[in-house]
Amino acid sequence: MASPATARRDPSRRWLTAALLVTAAASLVLLLAPLVESVEMTPTGGRAERHNLLSLEGWRAVVIVGVPVLLAAIPLALPRGARWPGTALVTFVMTAGVVLAILTVGVFYLPTVILLIAAMLRSDSVPA
């Protein structure tokens, strides 16, 4: 484990931690927020029900929204010398995911991509 002095000298670690926290928050919102509404019409009126992704899809939804969280955690688990290339790879994969899913859940993970890019720019181990 890195000492507090080492963590202070690596500014990208803060950005990577922020990216992980934002990704986890976005995944929790996607799982628990009532994003789907169904309306049932009856002769006496209508009834609207709101559902979250977890109640509709079950454990599969946890796996699906867990992938971005795991991706965001990868750079933090890497040693300092491998952190920049690992962050670049994760940023590429997350950007591809955001672009492909921009009309659905991709927009929720756009802040993660921005924070990962900031971590790459703030890293002190940028390859020459």
Image (cartoon, rainbow, N blue to C red):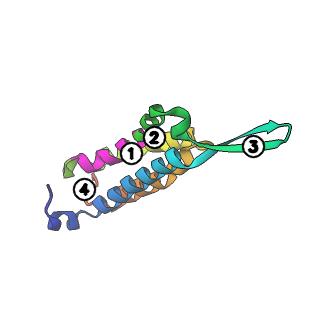
Residue 65 numbered tag: 2
Q: Which mark is residue 86?
A: none
| Residue 5: % across, % down | 15, 68
Q: Is mark 1 on a helix, strand or loop?
A: helix
Q: How far apart are marks 3 and 1 (CA)?
A: 36 Å
Residue at 26% x, 60% y is: 124
Q: Distance between the residues labelled 1 and 2?
A: 7 Å
Q: Is residue 69 magenta?
A: yes
**Magenta segment boundaries in residue numbering:** 67-78
Q: Which residue was labeled with disc 1?
A: 69
Residue 94 relative to residue 55: left or right: left
Which is more N-terminal, label 3 or label 4?
Answer: 3
Query: Mark 2 or 4, which is nearer the eye?
Result: 2
Question: Which tag is nearer the camera, tag 4 or tag 1?
Answer: 1
Residue found farthest to the front: 44
Kind of residue sitting beneath label 1: Val
Disc marking residue 125:
4
Is label 4 in a helix, a strand or a loop? loop
Label 4 close to label 1 by CB (< 8 Å): no
| Three-letter amino acid code of the residue under disc 3 | Arg
Q: Nearer the viewer, residue 118 or 34?
A: 34
Q: Where is residue 85 in the image (x, y as percent from the top left)?
A: 30, 45
Rendering coords of residue 13 (x, y %): 28, 59
Q: Quadrant of residue 103?
A: top right
Residue indicated by mark 3: 47
Evaluate if marks 3 and 1 touch, with contact meaning CB atoms under 8 Å apart.
Answer: no
How far is the residue under mark 4 from the one under mark 3?
A: 57 Å
Residue depicted at 36% across the width and 47% down the height: 72
Upstream in sequence: badge 2 or badge 4: 2
* Label 1 close to label 2 by CB (< 8 Å): yes
